[in-house]
Image (cartoon, rainbow, N blue to C red):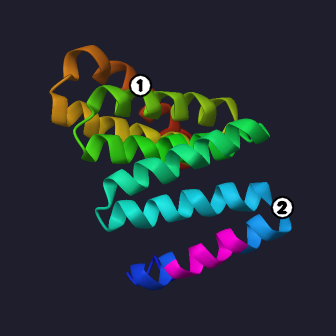
Amino acid sequence: MQRLTGDYVAAAATLARALEVCRSTGDEHGHANALVALGIVQRLTVSYPMATTTLTRALELHDKLGDRLGQADALSELGCVQRLTGDYSEARTSLERALDLYQDLADRHGQADSLRYLGRVFQETGDYEIVAPVTLTRWNSIAAWMTG
C-alpha cells in the first residue's frame, strides 16, 4: 500500500523488515517476492543500479526455487529497469523471456504487461517493422480474451 500511495521511503523500510523476517524464518519464497517488490520501489525512485542488483538477486532465487511466476515477475521488472537505463537489447531479452513464461503459465495479465513494456522498447528503438506485427498479433489475442 505504501508504494501505491507514493510513500517510497516507508515502503523500502517495510520491505527491509520483510526481508529480515523472511531470512530469519527461512522463507525463501517470501524473500524472493520481497526482493521483487523492493526492486520496484528502487525503480520508482530512480535507483536503477540498486534495482538491477535487487531484481537480479530475486530472479536467481526464483530460479533456484523453480518458481516460474516469480521468474516472470522478476524478469518483467528487470526488463523495465534495463529499458530505462537504455540497455534495450537486454530489456528485450528479459521481457521476451517474461512473456514466454507468462504465456506458458496462461497468465494473460502478465502477458499484457510484458507486451506493453516490449512496445515501449520497440517505440524507443524504432524497431517497428521487425517486431510490431508479431507483438500486435499477440496483444490482440490477449485483448480479445480479456474483453470476453
SS for tag 2? loop
Looking at the image, residue 120 sits to the left or right of residue 68; the answer is left
Question: Residue 60 placed where, x, y %?
Answer: 63, 40
Q: Say which quarter of the image contains residue 18.
A: bottom right
Q: Residue at x 36, y 59 (%)?
A: 43
Looking at the image, residue 30 sits to the left or right of residue 92; the answer is right
**Rendered view: 94 above or below 9:** above
Please, what is the three-letter code of the amino acid marked with disc 1? Thr
Question: Residue 40 placed where, x, y %?
Answer: 45, 61
**Rendered view: 80 above or below 51:** above
Q: Say which quarter of the image contains residue 27.
A: bottom right
Q: Residue at x 52, y 39 (%)?
A: 111
Q: Which residue is mark 1?
A: 137
Q: Say which quarter of the image contains residue 28.
A: bottom right
Looking at the image, residue 38 sits to the left or right of residue 66; the answer is left
**Rendered view: 101 above or below 44:** above
Q: Which residue is nearer to you in this view: 106 or 86?
A: 86
Label 2: how many residues lie within 10 Å, few (<14), some (14-19) or many (20+)? few
**Rendered view: 51 above or below 62:** below
Please, what is the three-letter code of the amino acid marked with disc 2? Gly
The part of the chain drawn in magenta is: 13-20
Residue 23 visible to the viewer:
yes
> What numbered label is drawn on residue 26?
2
Question: Residue 55 placed where, x, y %?
Answer: 51, 49
Q: Is residue 18 magenta?
A: yes
Q: Which residue is nearer to you in this view: 12 or 100?
A: 12
SS for tag 1? helix
